[in-house]
């Protein structure tokens, strides 16, 4: 424990009491995220400004102590779990909205600002920041950037990588730098902004983000469409995405999800419904009617059972209750939910759902699927009992087969949840070996001593050689 004692002693000398936690009982809450994995850090520090972050990185580098940057812990992959001890740097107090420039359509925020706070600040000027994860009321901008978390609006407006102009960051060397531009165009140098986004704190600590804003639409309208089966729904998704009007949300639920919500929702669905799409369209008052008609025509077709257009806000809320009923239904079915967010080409969604159903039968596990159909981002939920070792072993084997299935369809292992701890050993199955080695080389340039969130994102070299 010599390193721990030295780390604590140096933090006591460096920081006032209100900026640090050293007692294990106080540090306990900062050892987990929404993955339910847990490991107690040796110390927790609350970041205040860039100067403080620089000093903390230098201290951890001197002591070779792991440094894990944390937002609000809403991630599901264990990306902020301090499995190797060290220092958790919480950014929750670096939460200022520094500047809003409506004329140039950007906003500058610190990483601890919540997504909701950014939306409110932008909304006061008639704008919004497109990324909208489900946890937007609580999650931070830094966390959104760390795993490129997007949400339903990504189908039309893109992910954080598409909506971030520049960053300020402190690298694993202790050097502070700025990346990107304040303009909508720029091609000077390599794109380090997009490299840092999605790196899960393994390259540096983001201390400031310049976010690209989008004008708020005047209105939006919701459609709910039900289909005979997933193939009919996927064909509708392809038609919708091939016509000029892009929906701002295109969500789906499979037959298993529909079956689960019947007892938890007051929305009537056809008894034969095997798939459901929630389609939202936004735009101007003058054009919304034409846009809805275009999307409705595309959504209709062989296998479509019913399309309902929400005529009022109350109607839209009633239809959204169908989707919102899913989470409590899942919680009541099984004590644990293993949630993966794989992505496949849109045309392969039916094949994926069929394959998942086969795997569920083979491994004896209930699998429920829903997600962002417009970009093929499917949330695959394995419902298991964590106290049943046989079922948990079956879940591990099932996950392995799920990833094999996804990669065989030219898909990817994660769309927005990230890799963190739980998926890292599967990464080498997706990445080209030369590309993976280049990523490790880049990581050493940014973080030569390996202190930045070690054990996350990229698999160990030693494991690859075995």
Image: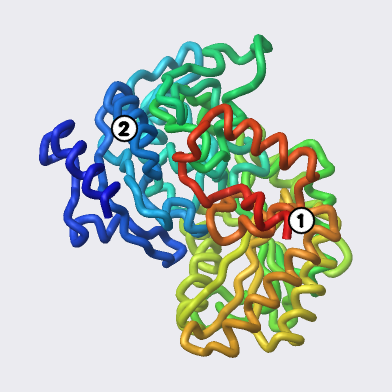
Left or right of residue 316: residue 307: right
Where does the image place residue 292, in percent across and percent down from the top left?
69, 46
Q: Residue at x 58, y 81 (%)?
A: 260
**Above-or-below relation of 140 to 253:** above
**Above-or-below relation of 405 to 411:** below
Q: Compute the Cα span from label 2 to label 1.
A: 36 Å
Q: Residue at x 47, y 32 (%)?
A: 204
Q: Disc 2 on helix, strand or loop? A: helix
Q: Residues within 10 Å of mark 2 (few under 14, many from 20)?
A: some
**Residue 251, labelled with which disc?**
none
Where does the image place residue 348, in percent across and percent down from the top left?
84, 59
Figure quadrant of residue 373: bottom right
- Decide which of 65, 419 is in the foreground and name it: 65
Left or right of residue 55: residue 391: right
Left or right of residue 99: residue 166: right
The residue that disc 2 covers is 59
The residue that disc 1 covers is 429
Where does the image place residue 103, in percent across and percent down from the top left?
47, 11
Q: Residue at x 47, y 54 (%)?
A: 75
Residue 116 seen in the figure? no
Lower position in the chain sequence, tag 2 or tag 1: 2
- Decide which of 42, 252 is in the foreground and name it: 42
Q: Nearer the viewer, mark 2 or mark 1?
A: 2
- Decide which of 176, 438 is in the foreground and name it: 438
Residue 58 seen in the figure? yes
- Position of the N terminus, as image quadrant, is bottom left
């Amino acid at each position: 424990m010599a390193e721990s004692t030295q780390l604590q002693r140096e933090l006591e000398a460096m920081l006032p009491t209100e900026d640090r936690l050293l007692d294990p009982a106080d540090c306990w809450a900062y050892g987990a995220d929404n993955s339910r994995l847990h490991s107690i850090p040796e110390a927790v520090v609350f970041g205040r400004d860039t100067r403080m972050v620089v000093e903390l990185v230098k201290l951890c580098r001197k002591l070779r102590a792991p440094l894990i940057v944390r937002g609000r812990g809403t991630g599901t992959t264990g990306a902020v779990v301090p499995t190797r001890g060290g220092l958790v740097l919480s950014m929750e107090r670096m939460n200022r909205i520094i500047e809003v420039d409506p004329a140039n359509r950007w906003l500058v925020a610190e990483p601890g600002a919540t997504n909701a706070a950014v939306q409110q600040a932008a909304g006061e000027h008639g704008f919004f920041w497109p990324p909208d994860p489900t946890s937007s009321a609580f999650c931070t901008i830094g966390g959104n950037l760390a795993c490129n978390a997007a949400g339903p609006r990504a189908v039309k407006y893109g992910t954080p990588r598409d909506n971030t102009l520049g960053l300020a960051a402190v690298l694993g060397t202790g050097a502070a730098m700025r990346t990107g531009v304040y303009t909508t165009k720029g091609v000077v140098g390599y794109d380090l902004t997009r490299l840092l986004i999605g790196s899960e704190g393994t390259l540096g600590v983001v201390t400031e983000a310049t976010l690209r804003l989008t004008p708020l639409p005047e209105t939006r309208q919701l459609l709910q469409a039900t289909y005979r089966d997933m193939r009919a729904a996927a064909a509708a998704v392809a038609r919708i995405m091939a016509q000029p009007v892009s929906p701002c949300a295109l969500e789906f639920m499979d037959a298993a999800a529909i079956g689960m919500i019947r007892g938890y929702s007051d929305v009537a669905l056809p008894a034969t419904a095997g798939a459901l799409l929630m389609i939202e369209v936004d735009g101007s008052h003058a054009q919304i009617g034409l846009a809805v008609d275009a999307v409705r025509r595309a959504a209709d077709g062989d296998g479509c059972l019913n399309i309902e257009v929400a005529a009022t806000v109350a109607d839209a809320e009633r239809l959204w209750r169908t989707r919102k009923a899913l989470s409590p239904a899942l919680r009541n079915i099984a004590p644990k939910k293993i949630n993966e967010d794989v992505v496949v080409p849109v045309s392969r969604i039916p094949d994926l759902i069929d394959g998942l159903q086969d795997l569920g039968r083979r491994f004896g596990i209930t699998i429920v699927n829903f997600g962002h159909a417009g970009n093929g981002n499917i949330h695959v939920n394995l419902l298991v009992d964590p106290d049943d070792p046989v079922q948990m072993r079956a879940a591990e084997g099932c996950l392995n087969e799920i990833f094999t299935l996804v990669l065989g369809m030219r898909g990817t292992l994660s769309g927005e949840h990230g890799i963190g701890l739980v998926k890292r050993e599967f990464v080498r199955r997706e990445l080209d070996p030369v590309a993976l080695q280049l990523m490790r080389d880049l990581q050493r340039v940014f973080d030569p001593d390996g202190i930045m969130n070690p054990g996350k994102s990229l698999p160990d070299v030693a494991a690859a050689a075995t």
